[in-house]
């Protein structure tokens, strides 16, 4: 059978003794004060209570915190780190918030306290600029930059799913603004930009649009970073998108191979072309020098011809005969000497005479 707990009789006696002692002290004070002692006692009690009430207005703000001070519900000012005093309740109220802590909000995904991750397709699925559907999961990191705006400018209904109470704008206001900014940026780009090509730029643009919206709403929130966690096509068409991505990778590989081949062949072709150009330049210099030499020789012959025309004609004639009939002993037949023959230079005295060819010399000169 259940028995009720027994009272500690010793403790009851001590409490009764203490209360009796306090009563006797008050009786002594009232007897000493006389007839008006009760009023003075009441005033003393009121004074002590007033002093305790005023002392309750002392508070401390930590180094990372700020306090918003209100009087009769209206915001007055803020207090930074340190020891402060402000009117206690019900006249004054104070709200102390950590303004340096980095807060976090997930979009398209929900991480429970036990670590389980759950997708939220209603938030993650969106349409790109080329009318494709993409699943985007993102994390926004932020902090409070204006405690006045954060506490008193926006009346937010809160977010029950994420465990955020109503009042502050980090509930539905922040989530809806983030979703709007992300959909706006993704809706202006192709799916390739969102999936692979320009993910960094998507993050930057989303952060800029989100900060602009939050400033227009006067939420007092500063966006620190916007990070895309997963960007993938819907599960129903993921295999097809994987094939497209693989094809794009193969394309890039072929392009890189072609560029490597170009880098290998182009310097060789340039070297060969320089070699051909240099050979052509050398041939040009050779031909120009030869032509200049022949022209100089012609001018020399012309100068001699101008001085002695007959001698020059004969010399040129004989040189031409030597060129046409090389290796043959040639004689000059002079009709003025009665048909006698003179051996043409070079004269040969010891060697046997080869076949001779008479070379007539015109009297009047070459025709």
Image (cartoon, helix red, strand yellow):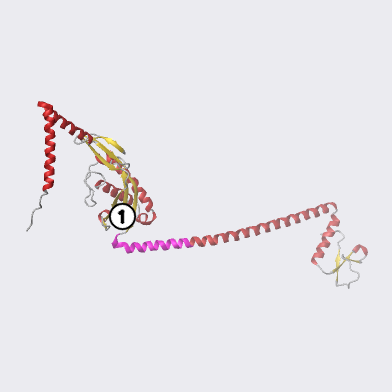
The image quarter containing residue 63 is top left
- The boundaries of the magenta stretch are 234-257
Main secondary structure along the magenta-highlighted residues = helix
Q: Which residue is mark 1?
A: 137
Task: Using the image, determine if residue 136 lies above or below residue 221.
Answer: below
Relative horizontal placement of residue 264, taking residue 282 as reference (left or right): left
> Which residue is at the front of the view, 53 or 24?
24
Q: Position of residue 336 (x, y in %)?
A: 91, 62
Classify 10 Å Cα crowding around label 1: few (below 14), some (14-19), many (20 and above): many
Q: Residue at x 47, y 61 (%)?
A: 256
- Rendering quarter of residue 97: top left
The secondary structure type at the circle numbered 1 is strand
Please report the residue visible at 26 percent of the width from the left and 38 percent of the height from the top: 59
Residue nearer the viewer, 204 or 111: 111
Q: Quadrant of the C terminus?
A: bottom right
- The residue lying at 13 percent from left, 43 percent from top is 14
Report x, y in % for residue 57.
Answer: 23, 36
In this view, the residue farthest toward the top is 35
Query: Can you name the residue that lies furthest to the left here?
Result: 1
Q: Is residue 48 above or below residue 213?
A: above
């Amino acid at each position: 059978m259940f028995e009720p707990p027994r009272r500690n009789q010793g403790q009851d006696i001590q409490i009764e003794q203490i209360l009796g002692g306090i009563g006797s002290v008050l009786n002594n004070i009232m007897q000493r004060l006389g007839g008006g002692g009760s009023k003075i006692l009441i005033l003393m009690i009121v004074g002590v209570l007033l002093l305790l009430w005023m002392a309750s207005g002392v508070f401390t703000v930590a180094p990372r915190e700020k306090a918003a001070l209100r009087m009769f519900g209206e915001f007055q000012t803020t207090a930074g780190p340190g020891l402060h005093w402000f009117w206690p309740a019900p006249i004054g109220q104070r709200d102390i918030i950590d303004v340096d802590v980095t807060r976090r909000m997930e979009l398209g995904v929900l991480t429970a306290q036990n670590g389980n991750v759950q997708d939220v397709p209603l938030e993650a699925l969106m349409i790109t600029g080329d009318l494709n559907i993409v699943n985007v999961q993102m994390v926004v990191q932020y902090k409070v930059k204006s405690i006045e705006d954060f506490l008193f400018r926006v009346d937010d209904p809160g977010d029950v799913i994420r465990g955020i109470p109503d009042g502050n704008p980090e509930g539905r206001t922040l989530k809806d603004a983030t979703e709007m900014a992300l959909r706006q940026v993704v809706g202006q780009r192709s799916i390739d930009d969102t999936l692979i090509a320009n993910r960094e730029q998507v993050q930057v643009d989303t952060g800029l649009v989100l900060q602009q919206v939050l400033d227009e709403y006067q939420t007092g929130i500063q966006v620190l970073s916007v990070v895309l966690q997963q960007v993938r096509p819907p599960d129903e068409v993921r295999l097809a998108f994987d094939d497209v991505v693989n094809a794009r990778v193969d394309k890039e590989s072929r392009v890189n191979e072609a560029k490597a081949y170009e880098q290998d062949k182009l310097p060789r072709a340039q070297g060969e072309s320089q070699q051909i150009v240099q050979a052509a330049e050398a041939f040009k210099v050779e031909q120009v020098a030869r032509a200049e030499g022949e022209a100089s020789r012609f001018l020399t012959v012309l100068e001699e011809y101008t001085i002695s025309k007959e001698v020059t004609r004969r010399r040129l004639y004989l040189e031409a005969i030597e060129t046409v009939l090389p290796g043959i002993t040639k004689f000059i037949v002079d009709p003025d000497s009665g048909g006698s023959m003179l051996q043409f230079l070079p004269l040969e005295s010891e060697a046997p005479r080869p076949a001779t060819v008479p070379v007539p010399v015109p009297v009047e000169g070459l025709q």
